[in-house]
Image: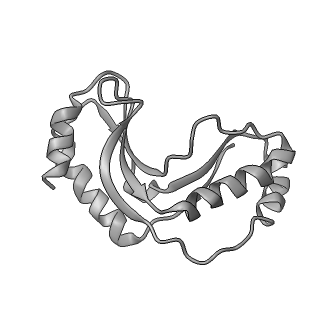
Amino acid sequence: MRLFVALDIPEETRRAIRELISRLQPVARGAKWVRPEGIHITLKFIGWTEDENLAQIKEHLSRVPHRAAIPVAFRNFGFFPNERRPRVFFVGINAGAELARLAADIESHLAPLKIPKEERAFTPHLTLARFKSVARPRRMVSSAASS
């Protein structure tokens, strides 16, 4: 099974994303849009793992320290790896150091299980679409910004 550790988002945010996607779909027909009900904040992508490893992963995650709620703000739009070669269209997240600390704690608690460490810096975001070919991101960003 394909696993990741994530935070859910509020329904009002999900509703706003649903509306945004419906406005952007005509502008970026080559995009593969995510299902709004599946949008989440990924803290750690684990990848493919066998079912028998799930209990051990849950056990290690249960040791991650609990914290108070982490305030987040959804701001700006962007592309991974960049606007010239877009593969992913996303909404950025401002959350302060607490969210990054939670992601780091999850990473360290899973390390004894030999789950590969993420090599890229933690960049909290909500993935909205993926591209197989180069799209017209400037038009998409300007359409999103006017929403």
How has the structure been colored for display?
Answer: one colour
Total numbered badges shown on the rendered structure: 0
Q: Quadrant of the N terminus?
A: top right
Is 1 situated above or below 126? above
Place of residue 20 in the rendered image (x, y in percent of width and height, measured from the top left): 23, 54
Q: Does 28 sit left or right of 42 as displayed?
A: left
Q: Does 73 sit left or right of 26 as displayed?
A: right
Residue 109 placement: quadrant = bottom right
Camera-side residue: 105 or 48? 105
Place of residue 138 in the rendered image (x, y in percent of width and height, measured from the top left): 19, 34
Is 76 situated above or below 10? above
Q: Residue drawn 79% across and 41% down?
A: 50
Residue 9 placement: quadrant = bottom left
Is 94 situated above or below 90? below
Q: Quadrant of the C terminus?
A: bottom left
Place of residue 51 in the rendered image (x, y in percent of width and height, measured from the top left): 79, 47
Q: Residue drawn 37% across and 24% down?
A: 132
Q: Residue drawn 47% across and 71% down?
A: 71
Q: Residue furthest bottom?
A: 68
Place of residue 84 in the rendered image (x, y in percent of width and height, measured from the top left): 30, 24
Q: Residue furthest front?
A: 97
Residue 47 placement: quadrant = top right
Q: Does 119 sit left or right of 126 as displayed?
A: right
Q: Residue drawn 49% across and 62% down?
A: 96
